[in-house]
Amino acid sequence: MSLVELHNVVKRFGTNTVLDRVSLSVEAGEIIAVIGRSGSGKSTMLRCINGLEPIQEGRIVFDGETVNDPATNLRKLRQRVGIVFQSYNLFPHLSVERNITLAPRVVKGMEREAARELAAGALARVGLADKIDAYPDQLSGGQQQRVAIARSLAMRPQLMLFDEITSALDPELTGEVLKVLERVAGEGMTMMLVTHEMGFARRVATRLIFMHQGRIWEEGRASNVLAKPRTPELETFLDAVLH
Amino acid sequence: MIREFALNDVYYLLLAARWTLALTSLAFLGGGTVGLLVALLRVAPFAPLRIIGAGYVNIVQGIPLLAWLFVLFFGLPILAGVRVSPWIAATVAFSIYAGAFLGEIWRGCLRAIPRQQWEAGASLGLSFVEQLRHIIVPQAVRVAIPPTVGFLVQLIKNTSLAAVIGFIELTREGQLTTAATYRPFTVYIAVAAIYFAICFPLTQWSRRLERTLRVAR
């Protein structure tokens, strides 16, 4: 059984169909890069997987549990599916430590000391061990995004979703975040990432998915898909992003 | 018999000002409780609750405070056969009224926190109540303090309406003193000065809070 399965998923915002019968299986340990134009449904697909967006048709299954079943405990599920957003979404009123320990303490009932150690460990993984007592507004964008990654990692998820996490960053800050992503990928984490970093996708992803008009238009090994696009849509897209 | 307006009268006005403050405190407490409930209903992730919250606000804001006072004080004995003291009628009427306005103010403050903050909490597995308590409310409080103090100042002045049902507070005491001394100008200047002495420090405090909260996290 795959870790994540999407069966004919349809997502509409009003009359606008954003996901049009999307089917996909992700095995544990895979690193999936999702590319496509804005509005192609790639971010929405990620947000549906952890139940942030309800779907209208089809089925999403994570580790045997149906995400879009009203009986599913989304809170439990989300502890196992981390997501990192484009705009970091750190809690500005809490220190880096409290940002990371809030959910472990509130949701998992962890003790203060153990939670601080957990935070320190997660921060070390993203190379920010010395920022544990800082506040988000004292950090650069890249550092904030790395804290957001640490916050997600601290929940020990089985799957991490990354929603264009470098799109709001300067090129040199993008580099430091991608390095962290690569390290997390190297630890065997299952990851799905929406990205515009083609070089990164080619290097790190085990599979690449090109979305167009709410559908999975092409998929395959990253190097193959990028080198030999089979559809004019992907060709046009690559032309636009690679120049 | 008409007497002179003397220091003694100022003393009585000050004593009456205590009841203005007492009524304000009770109304703020009652209204704060109602307002918190209304604000939470209005941001609840369940439409019927939001409709109940909005309905309350619309009804209360659409009826003058004076009417609430009359209905509670004169209406209840006729409609329900219950006699209520001016204290109870005034406290309840002001709580109903303050609840609607504070509810609206606080709803706005909760809504001022970006949706992504809720989402970040939800995606970490926090429940609606946990998101509110740990993420949204602590940030919203900073936004809420200045308008809340502003409303409190309005409330202090509005308690003078309770005079119409025989509640003796600062304004009512002023009326009584005027009747006895026939010095309306002097008396009401004194009354106004007392209101000002209560409200001005509050507005100043609110301004200072606004400044410090803008720079604080």
Image (cartoon, rainbow, N blue to C red):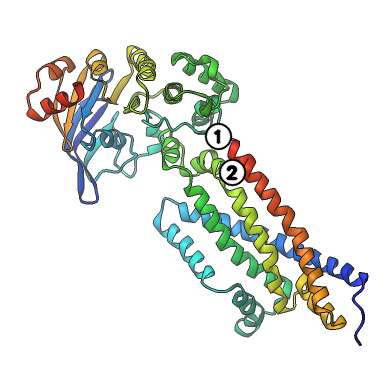
Q: Which residue is mark 1?
A: A93
Task: Tell me where residue A28 appears, x and y as whole percent.
Answer: 27, 20
Left or right side of A136 for B20: right
Residue at screen point 92% across, 79% down = B4
Against A167, is A41 above or below?
below
Q: Which residue is mark 2?
A: B142
Against A60, is A15 above or below?
below
Secondary structure at badge 1 equals loop
- Is B160 in front, or is B25? B160
Task: Tell me where residue B139 appears, x and y as whole percent.
Answer: 55, 41
Residue at screen point 63% across, 79% down = B70
Q: Callout 2: residue from which chain?
A: B
Q: Would you identify the image quadrant in which residue A216 lies?
A: top left
Task: Tell me where residue B23 appears, x and y as whole percent.
Answer: 73, 65
Question: Callout 1, which amino acid?
Answer: His
Which quadrant: the C terminus of chain A?
A: top left
Residue at screen point 55% across, 63% down = B100
